[in-house]
Image: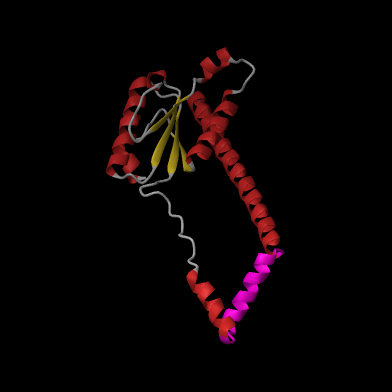
Amino acid sequence: MSETDDLSLARWEVATLTGRLRWLEAERDAAVEDRDRHQQQAATLRGSPSYRLGRALVELARHPVGVAGRAARRIRHGRRPPPRRRPPVGSVPALVYVAVGLDGAASHALVRALRQRIVVDGDHLPVLVTDQPELRGLQVPGVVLEYLPDPETWRRHDPGAGWEAMLAGRIAQLCRDHGAAGTVVIDPRDPPTLARLLSN
């Protein structure tokens, strides 16, 4: 285990955490915007004539007086609440695995282990970020594969851009796209086996 390998792994972990933080910040901003929009809609509704009429009908229903009370109850009972939305059957959270620096054999073994893991216990959708060219374009049922060029290739392609920043941005985008519940950095010196994936 060399210091260079430790440094590379630490850089990937920092990039992964940065991507996760970007996604969480975007989620927070979206939630704040959603809250503000709902507050504005509620304020508009409270000022509308239909809202005041509805309040009056509720008061009549609580304190019925003759025909007006019966009419208010008929209106109230004749309207059913809208059905509640339910999440799609079988939907599971995603988990982003960052597997950078693995050789071809280790990358294929990891994909097989992830595929077997979800067959045994399909509690999440694996999203695998890899720089292994052998996995580029590979289709694996139940596993999302995202290929990124390795750091050397990226530097040759775009010398002015930082590879870690590109990785963090892509992880943030994948977290947003798949609603990821978390991220896992795979140590290229010790990729997990099926038994370890099942125990986590």
| Magenta-colored segment: predominant secondary structure | helix
Q: Nearer the viewer, residue 7 or 18?
A: 18
In the rendered view, would you say 37 is above or below 197?
below
Residue 67 in view here: yes
The image shows residue 102 at horizontal and vertical percentages of 41, 24
Q: Position of residue 175 (x, y in %)?
A: 51, 38
Task: Say whether residue 55 is magenta.
Answer: yes
Colour convention of the picture: secondary structure
Q: Nearer the viewer, residue 190 or 180?
A: 180
Q: Which residues are magenta?
A: 47-66
**Is 48 placed left or right of 31 in the picture?**
right
Q: Position of residue 58 (x, y in %)?
A: 60, 76
Front residue of this view, candidates 199 and 6: 199
The answer to whether any part of residue 195 appears in the image is no
Which residue is more in the foreground, 128 or 142? 142
109 lies left or right of 19: left
Tally of numbered discs: 0
Q: Position of residue 120 (x, y in %)?
A: 27, 43
Measured along the vertical axis of the image, is residue 159 above or below residue 127? above
In the rendered view, tell whether residue 14 sits above or below residue 147: below
Q: Residue furthest front?
A: 67
Assess whether residue 76 is covered by the magenta stretch.
no
Residue 14 horizontal side relative to residue 123, left or right: right
Residue shown at the point (57%, 87%) measured from the top left: 66
